[in-house]
Amino acid sequence: MAVSSALLIFLSGVAAGFLNVTAGGGSFITLPLLILLGGLPAAVANGTNRIAILSQNLIAISRFRASGYRDIRQGLGLAVSAVAGAVLGSILAQDFPERTFRLVLGGIMVLALLPVLRKPSAAERTEGVEELRHPRLQIPIFFVIGAFGGFIQAGTGYLIIAALSTLGGLSLVRTNSLKLVIIAAYILPSILVFLVNGNVRWLPALILTGGCSIGGWLGAAFAIRKGDRWIRFVLLGAVLGLAGKLLGLY
């Protein structure tokens, strides 16, 4: 891998880690760059990306805990059905045709513009909301989210925000704290599936992990202090640019 490509992947990890923690969608940046700059096949990029996400989330969880957001028990409870879904989704992702995977990723990136552009609800703007609404409904919802995350991961953060904040009524900062725990829980068995199938490359994984870990810590600190509304504009540009590339528009 060229030094310039490695540097861009590292810097993309910093940006992605920040986005993943404060809002979501960081994999929309890292997955295409692992494919386009790292020269990785789609399934390998999908697996390699998950190593960085796990490290990023563990570091961000510790930052949230230090600020009083101790949501590990509730997050793990919500993650139970997501873990089952993630194993299924990861298995399906192993032999998915590469061209189809790129089209699916590009299409999902375009669809991700909807929550990016959507005006935050009152629940998302309210701090201190603690009771999760519709807890039983969350079980099948998180199975589907886990299956999606196991398959492609990119955009999963938005689905969790929709489940916990828009539907569940939690504040956005609390939602982000729980989101980190849920993703860390289901992504571990997902990584094992990709490892068993030989779809992880350690050099780009370690480069990306370094960037994502820094970005995750910064994102957690920022989310706790200020929130993430402004990040929508940054993500809007990234999604449009990278989706167009994957879809072959230029």
Image: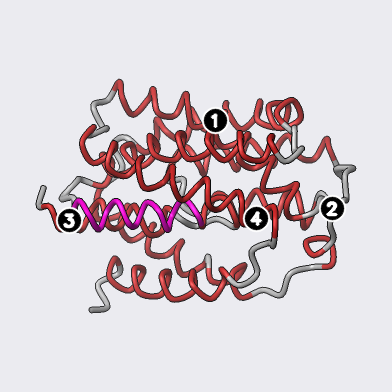
> Residue 186 — which label?
1
Q: Which residue is mark 2?
A: 169
Q: Earlier in the sequence, mark 4 or mark 2?
A: 2
Image spot of residue 209 (x, y percent):
36, 40
Q: Nearer the viewer, mark 3 or mark 2?
A: 3
| Label 1 Cα crowd, 10 Å radius (few <14 / some 14-19 / many 20+) | many
Gap in angstroms between the C-alphas marked 4 and 1: 22 Å
Q: Amino acid at mark 1?
A: Tyr
> Residue 54 — which label?
none
Q: Residue at x 42, y 58 (%)?
A: 15
Q: Earlier in the sequence, mark 3 or mark 4?
A: 3
Q: Which residue is mark 4?
A: 223
**Helix or strand or loop: what does disc 2 sit on?**
loop
Q: Main secondary structure of the magenta part?
A: helix
Quarter of the image where one finds residue 137: top right
**Which of 126/160 is in front?**
126
Q: Amino acid at mark 4?
A: Ala
Q: Are the residues flagged by discs 4 and 2 in contact, CB closer than 8 Å?
A: no
Q: Which residues are magenta?
A: 6-18
Gap in angstroms between the C-alphas marked 3 and 1: 29 Å
Q: Residue at x 27, y 57 (%)?
A: 33
Q: Earlier in the sequence, mark 3 or mark 2?
A: 3
Q: Which residue is mark 3?
A: 5
**Helix or strand or loop: what does disc 3 sit on?**
helix
Gap in angstroms between the C-alphas marked 3 and 4: 29 Å
